[in-house]
Amino acid sequence: MKVTETMIEGMYQIKIDQKNRLATRNQVPGTSVYGERLIKANNEEYRLWDPFRSKFAAAYLSGMKLLPQLKGKNILYLGVSTGTTPSHFSDILDDGFIYGVEFSPKVMRKFYRLAEQRPNLIPILADARRPEEYSSYVFDVDLLYQDVSQPEQATIFGRNAQDYLKPGGVGIIAIKSQSINVALEPEEVFSKQMNILENNFGLKVLENSTIDPFEKKHAVMIVKKD
């Protein structure tokens, strides 16, 4: 079975049934997080990374070129949910860690159980719309990642970037157009959100792409803080 590393260090492609599948090396061998398939190859265990369950994987397979490296980074992740994408980040990070912010107590209980197995995950039960709520727990980070279903997605991201993203740091935001305005065309929603990031918060959008066919009416934006 052929395993090759992608342009993202710690993210691999494994050829299975004539198809290349994304994967990470499992840091908790024998354990699946969300029902993903575990693969043994070269005396290592890998977890297949489902792009239909992860905006980062979908963005990579959609051809985005400026996705940042993850290894060794400290990350603030807004909207960790039960931990699908954060678990793959956890596999990659090595000495970095993830502050995982989630609003729902029910969902956070599941993420907390995941964090018990993975010490580089730090659960924070809080509202991402109010970044001051976790100022006592979060220090400046290299990467800000956001995947939330809220009407003011760009504003939430911008406020957290102001408070926690280091100068020169990079952000990834998944924009869900249907959570913002169902009456507008997705492209118009994406444009308005980009304008908020750039004009209201001084962030520079480096790359912007939809992630069809993995997620309809979604876009992923890569931004940088000067």
Image (spheres, rainbow, N blue to C red):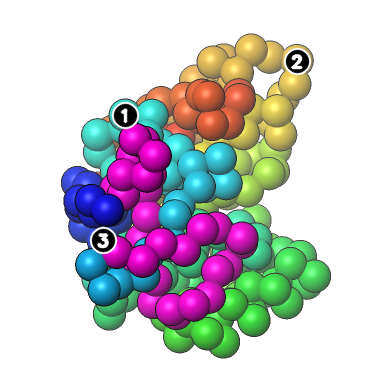
Residue mark closest to the camera, 3 vs 2: 3
- Seen in the image, is 157 located left or right of residue 56? right
Query: What's the distance in space between the residues labelled 3 and 1, CA to CA?
Result: 18 Å
Task: Determine whether the residue tagged by mark 2 lies in a helix, strand or loop.
Answer: loop
Amino acid type at image mark 1: Gly
Label 1 element class: loop
* In this picture, residue 84 sits left or right of residue 161: right
Q: Earlier in the sequence, mark 3 or mark 1?
A: 3
Q: Mark 2 belongs to which amino acid?
A: Ala
Residue 169 visible from this viewpoint: no
3 and 1 marks in contact (CB < 8 Å): no
In the displayed structure, 147 sits above or below 28; it is above
Examine the image and state in which quarter residue 26 appears: bottom left
Q: Is residue 173 above or below residue 132?
A: above
| Residue in front for this viewpoint, 31 or 214 | 31
Name the one closer to the observer, 187 or 45. 45
At x 48%, y 72%, the residue is 99
Q: CA distance from mark 3 to mark 2?
A: 40 Å
* Magenta-highlighted residues: 13-41
Label 3, on which residue?
Answer: 10
Amino acid at pointer 3: Gly
In this view, the residue in front, 170 or 49, is 49
Residue located beneath label 1 in the image: 63
User: In the image, what residue occupies the spot 27% across and 53% down?
Assistant: 1
> What residue would you read off at disc 2?
183
Can residue 36 be seen in this snapshot? yes
Q: Which label's residue is closer to the chain start, 2 or 1?
A: 1
* Mark 3 surroundings: few (<14), some (14-19) or many (≥20) residues within 10 A: some
